[in-house]
Structures are given as structure tokens and as C-alpha cells.
Amino acid sequence: MRSGIAVLAVSAVLAHSSAVAQSGRIDVVTIHPPVAAPFQCSEHALGAEDHVPDALGSDCVVVRRVGGPGRNLASLYTGDGTRNEDWHSWREPLLAPFDGIVLIVQINPETTEPGVRGEGRSSAILFRQGFEDDSSAPQVAYIHVREVLVAAGDTVRAGQEVARIGNNGSSFHPHVHVGAFLGDLMSDDAVPLQIRMDLEAMGRVRGTARE
């Protein structure tokens, strides 16, 4: 699934930074969890997508223990899931992935209904780690966002609320696609990064999550 932000040009020099670790032949970046609520992510396997930032990206959804027998099993939505409001992810606050700079904000004002693939570019935010003009730093994209609170050029701190989860563009249901990479977004030499969540930060923010 090609995300809308993949059509945006971002200049960068291909290089590695101290924020990126090696894991076999895949580079890894650790980020602040995108939401405070319990969530789960489906990850794109190496080779499943051939374009950045979808390659090695993660599609993340909020889960709540309100389903199944005794309403104790994790569920993605209540009711039949036909409304965006049924989904636990819908309008969940999104938290900045690290201390850094907002490079791009892209808005699609349309909202997609669950089960129907939307059209046009997805709403997205692109962040670069660190406050210096460092083109070698990791970049992270949040895609399918809404109610964006930041603008290009803003600085953010890890865990700061920057938007809410939406359902727009190339999407079938409310979720946030998280993609990470090094290098020029439009270059064939861009390097996708596997995403790991900062579990220490996750422990700190879980107490703030709504039930």
C-alpha cells in the first residue's frame, strides 16, 4: 500500500547516525510509542514493499479489552466496526516519536469509512530526529493522521501530542502507519528502518492512557 507521503521530496544525505542500531542486515531505530493507549502493530516484512517509508513500516491500532467472552479479550472496535467512531484508534492522540523537527505536514481533508479504501494522498507528518540541520538523522512519518497540532519547522519533544489518529487516503480503517528511513525520500538509495518501541517510555505513558 503506497502511502501519500511517499510522493513528497525531502532532501537528505545518506548516512547513519548514533540513533540507529544494527540488527543483522536491517537498520533499527527506537522511537517513543505513537500512542499512550495499549496498541498493536502489524509490520511490513523485508521485501513486502519496495518504497520508503512503507518498507519495514508498521500499521498500528489501539486495542482495548472489551471484546469476547466476559468482555475481557482485546478488540479493535465496538459494535460492527462500520463507523470510524466504533474503532478504539479513532481520534486517539498521537505522540511525537522523538525530540526533533517537523519537516512536512500534509493534509487530506476527506475521511474514509471503514471497509472502503480512500482516495488521494494520506494526511501525514514527517519528523527528523534532533534539532540540528542534520540530513543524516533518522526520519519518521506518521500517516493517516487528523487534527494536526504542528506545522513544518516546529520542534517537538518525544511524547508530545502532535495529532490524532484518522482514516484517510489509502486506508481501510482508523490506524496510524509509522514509517522510518534514512536518506532522500525520493531516492532509490533511501534506507528503510525497522521500528522498535521505547518500552521504558511506554511504561511511563501507559498511566495517562484513557480506559
Image (cartoon, rainbow, N blue to C red):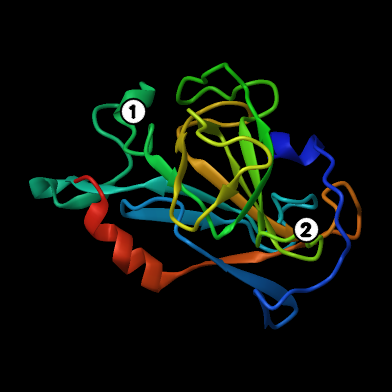
- Tell me the amino acid under the disc marked 2: Asp
Whether 120 is drawn above or below 8: the answer is above
Q: Secondary structure at mark 2?
A: loop
**For residue 133, what is the image quadrant?**
bottom right
Q: Which residue is mark 1?
A: 81
Is 10 left or right of 155, judged from the image as shown? right
Binning the other alpha carbons within 10 Å of mark 1 as few (below 14), some (14 to 19) or many (20 upward) gives some
Residue closest to the eye, 37 or 131: 131
Q: Residue furthest left?
A: 70
Q: Is residue 175 left or right of residue 70?
A: right
Residue at 76% of width from left, 51% of height from top?
Answer: 52
The image shows residue 167 at horizontal and vertical percentages of 50, 28
- As helix, strand or loop, the secondary structure at mark 1 comes to loop
In the image: residue 62, left or right of residue 144: left
- Kindly report the distance in space between the C-alpha atoms of the residues bearing marks 2 and 1: 43 Å
The residue beneath circle 2 is 133
